[in-house]
Image (tube, rainbow, N blue to C red):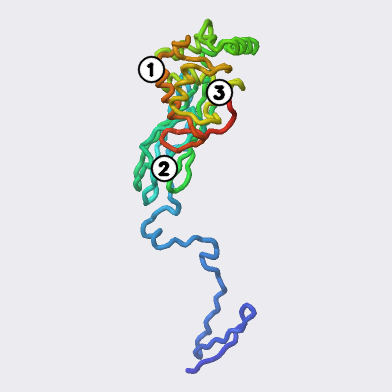
Amino acid sequence: MHAVARTIFFGGSILICLSLAGQPAPTAKPYAPSADRRGVRRQNSRDMTRNEPITPWIVFDADTKQYNATPGEVFAPFVFNLTNVWSNEIVITGVKASCGCTTAKMPPVPWHIPPGASGQVQARINLAGKMGLVTKTLTFSTSVGIRVAYLKVNIPLSPSTSGTLSEVERKAAMMRAAGDPQAIFKGDCMKCHVEKGRNTFGETLYAADCGICHESSHRESVVPDLHALKQATDFNYWKTIIAEGKPHTMMPGFSTAVGGPLGDAQITSLATYLNHTISHNFTSAITNAASVPATGERGAL
């Protein structure tokens, strides 16, 4: 038995193959790119042995939740259930709402979530001054990236607003308030600016007595957005301005000492709520109480 040399032309090259006599020469195989070059991801041994997801992530039971409010309802509640589907711990470092009327409640941050563990975030939207379909967001900062949850609420026309002032009546009321800010605590205005907040405190009081103007989707240009004040604020700032009002503006004094409807305990609770939920000193520190950056126009406060 002896070797036979054969010449094979392949792809412009000459291949010299040796074969044993009586045996066919080996067939040249065409070139084929590797799996990597075809764009197919090659899992490393860690992926294959531990069977972990390629991307670490937190899964929500729903990225968007919708609530249908009833007439006169003050807050729209939401609950988001989340799960760490990764094989390592994930840390939530904070949550920030798209506006100050939306707050979130969850474990203190940093919130460490072990692999496979679940948790819950409760949220609610202050409906004061709002109507129609409203959409807000909660942005979660985590050790594996940013996650955004969407909150939608359908707000019907409240019975208390079924007799909404006409444009002429609104202008007349604004003129009265411009001349005497305390006028909103008298006559027909008491129905909205006094009765709704009677015997309430904190966030509920804010929704009744403050949100009706400052959070309204029909907010007048002279009524400031409290989340957009271009000045530093603290507890004493809020307490003073709530109790005494602000001269030469339409902001009335709410203290009973100046003819307003609120006692000291109510004013203190309101100032505490505002100091904890609205950004001050031009910062928007991320905490488990959602807050909003201080940007925008200066108003009456």
79 and 215: which one is in front?
Answer: 215
Residue of label 3: 132
Q: Is mark 3 on a helix, strand or loop?
A: strand
| Label 1, residues with CA under 10 Å away: few <14, some 14-19, many ≥20 | few
- Specify the amino acid type for callout 3: Gly
Image x and y of residue 106, in percent:
38, 35
Separation of residues labelled 3 and 1 (CA atoms): 34 Å
- Counting residues from the start of the chain, the first of labels 3 and 1 encountered is 3
Locate residue 14: give its quadrant.
Answer: bottom right
Task: Tell me how far mark 1 sits from mark 2, CA to CA.
Answer: 34 Å
Q: How crowded is mark 2: few (under 14 residues within 10 Å), some or many (20 or more)?
A: some
Chain-order first, disc 1 or disc 2? 2
Given residues 10 and 203, the one toward you in this image is 203
Q: In this view, does 28 lie above or below 102?
A: below
In the rendered view, would you say 296 is above or below 189? Answer: below
Q: Which residue is drawn at 38% across and 56% down?
A: 51
Instruction: Residue under label 2, please give it.
Output: 93
Do the residues under discs 3 and 2 have CB atoms within 8 angstroms?
Answer: no
Q: Which amino acid does label 2 sit on?
A: Thr
Residue neighbourhood size for the residue with mark 3, other residues' Cα within 10 Å, grouped as few (<14), some (14–19), many (≥20): few
- Who's the residue at 45% across and 52% down the image? 55
| Percent x, y of residue 72 | 48, 16
Is residue 280 left or right of 300 when viewed as pictured?
Answer: left
